[in-house]
Amino acid sequence: MQADAMVLLDGVNVDVPPSWIRPGAAIICCEPTLETVSLSVAYFLCFISDIEISRAQTPKPVTQLAEEIGLLPEELEAYGRNKAKVRLSLLDRLHSQPDGKYVLVAGITPTPLGEGKSTVTIGLVQAMSAHLKHNSFACLRQPSQGPTFGVKGGAAGGGYAQVIPMEEFNLHLTGDIHAITAANNLVAAAIDARMLHEATQSDKALFNRLVPSVNGVRSFSPIQISRLRRLGIFKTDPAALSMQEISTFVRLDLDPSKITWQRVVDTNDRFLRKITVGQASTEKGQIRETGFDIAVASEIMAILALADSLEDMKNRLARMVVGTSRSGQPVTAEDLGVSGALAVLMKDAIKPTLMQTLEGSPVFVHAGPFANIAHGNSSVLADKLALKLVGRDGFVVTEAGFGADIGMEKFFNIKCRASGLRPNVVVLVATVRALKMHGGGPNVSAGAPLPREYIDENLSLVAGGCRSNLKKQIQIAHLFGVPVVVALNVFKTDTQAEIDLVCQIAKECGASDAVPCHHWAQGGRGSVELAKAVDEAANRPSNFQFLYNTEVMEKIRTIARKVYGADDVELSPEAKSKIDYYNQQGYGSLPICMAKTHLSLSHMPEKKGAPTGFVLPIRDVRASVGAGFIYPLVGTVYLCGLQMCPARIKAVEEL
């Protein structure tokens, strides 16, 4: 009565009373051979939803998990029974502990359906910890509610390789994205309020508001003293400022047409992409056009992911450029006087959240920048904490978003620069489905049935995808001097001949090893061979190197040519002027974060495989000075997010 399925063997005469079977259980009839029974059960598993699997397992209390991995009670801040924040004081306690081995999971250019990097990450950690008995940790990004309610869905993994409880992971978690939304929109509100007051008040009235007299005493705050020094004014007594100095201090003189900061919402609300604000009579004609981005596209999210301490985060928040004055000078969050408030709003969000997999392996969930419009990796702090906790012989497995040309390249060139950490091995996830697409297969669309080419055996398409996209992505990893293990995420429609062919060609293309993985159906047991291959590769020498150390234009050209395979880049006039401006402002040394489609190595989503002979168009170049990178906009990529999916909303309501 507790079973989800009952297998009845042909030729075996058994009476099965209805009272033996739980209502809703599956009855499977098959031939009495081990292979047939296994296939039948595997087929049945396809019809068990991820949420059913998640809810069938009771997570161990987070306090027990914390004790198992070596956390002290005072280093844990529990959020209910299943998750907890971990305090950064852990880094001080374990500062002399050697780091473990650092593994990055990346992928080939995906179909719109995704190829399973999260499930591979979780399956690998389950295999490492539960089956090979290595100290192991997974570090994952927190999913945005945009994709969760959109076509893509959640990001907790799937099948028997998931983070649990799934619904807590996918919805709200511990409120980090809400904190980012609040902080981001505080900046937006401060911008509009400051422009209103500057347009309607005298210098003296503004000064009295910004530096009010309290009990007869007027004094500058530390943030205001910092602004005065940047202006070349080294006085600390408000009464000592001349009228000209007061005017310079109180007026940011923001140019409304050059405000780069937008509001955010963690929902795919396409009608907010462009809006008009200031239409109420109380705003005294201060009307301007602006818009909303999705919350995880906020620079504050990127800062959360790249900061290595609370103080570092506070400094990065202060450096965020929100617009330009009419005289052409950048205006920062510190100029607005809100950087301290932002740090207070983010003081809990900077702590990683501890959860677990279905098999009880520890997981840090922290930060969630997209990889196509941001740098697409979980936080530096989560990785650093995990590397200390696992110790010298342990493993930390983290995931980079989308294909290796996007998430992995940014992991190396941006995240590793910020953290000082160096990876030991790259796990490159591939699927037969995606390889067939890159080998010339028909278009794959989310929500539409797969064409027959993806269901029936087709070795020609598989070989074409291996020798184009898979080969190119392996080469990209080798540009950075890191060994590659290919993980073939096996689907039930894959044939043995297709699986063998992928593994064979992957090794021919330079992979240290290539292993089929069955973690979705078997959990950690299905990724044991992958774990062994990763262990072996991680013990080989890694000659890590960055791809560039030059000026902005050459950095963009290097990525376009060496990573994407372009012949050259073409800059719009606006992009050229922006690069000149950023060099003039001293931002030229910042790394590059290309905002590009994730569906192709090129800027053209329909071009699969490994396109060549194209010129990469850069329509604009922007800077996230606080986060610490410059991001060129390639082709027609949008920063606002994905479209809403009514079917997904209904599914979440039912959940």
Image (cartoon, rainbow, N blue to C red):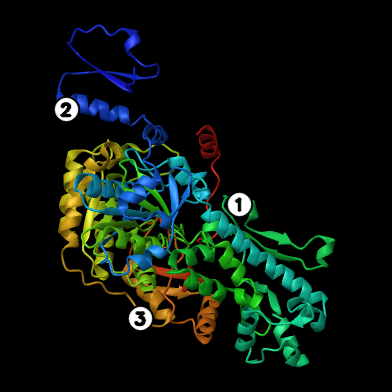
The crowding category of the residue bearing disc 2, from other C-alpha atoms within 10 Å (few below 14, some 14 to 19, many at least 20), is few
Residue 53 position by quadrant: top left
- Dot 1: element: helix
Q: CA distance from mark 3 to mark 1?
A: 38 Å
Residue depicted at 31% across the width and 30% down the height: 45
Could you tell me which residue is drawn at 36 percent across and 43 percent down? 162
Q: Looking at the picture, which amino acid does disc 2 mark? A: Glu
Gap in angstroms between the C-alphas marked 1 and 2 = 50 Å
Of residues 278 and 501, the one nearer the viewer is 278
Viewer can see residue 465: yes
* Side of 36 relative to 277 (left or right): left
Assign the N terminus to one quadrant of the image.
Answer: top left
Of marks 3 and 1, which one's residue comes earlier in the chain? 1
Do the residues bearing badges 1 and 2 touch, measured as CB atoms within 8 Å?
A: no
Q: Which numbered disc, 1 or 2, marks the residue that appears first in the sequence?
A: 2
Between 77 and 397, which is closer to the camera in this rendering?
Answer: 77
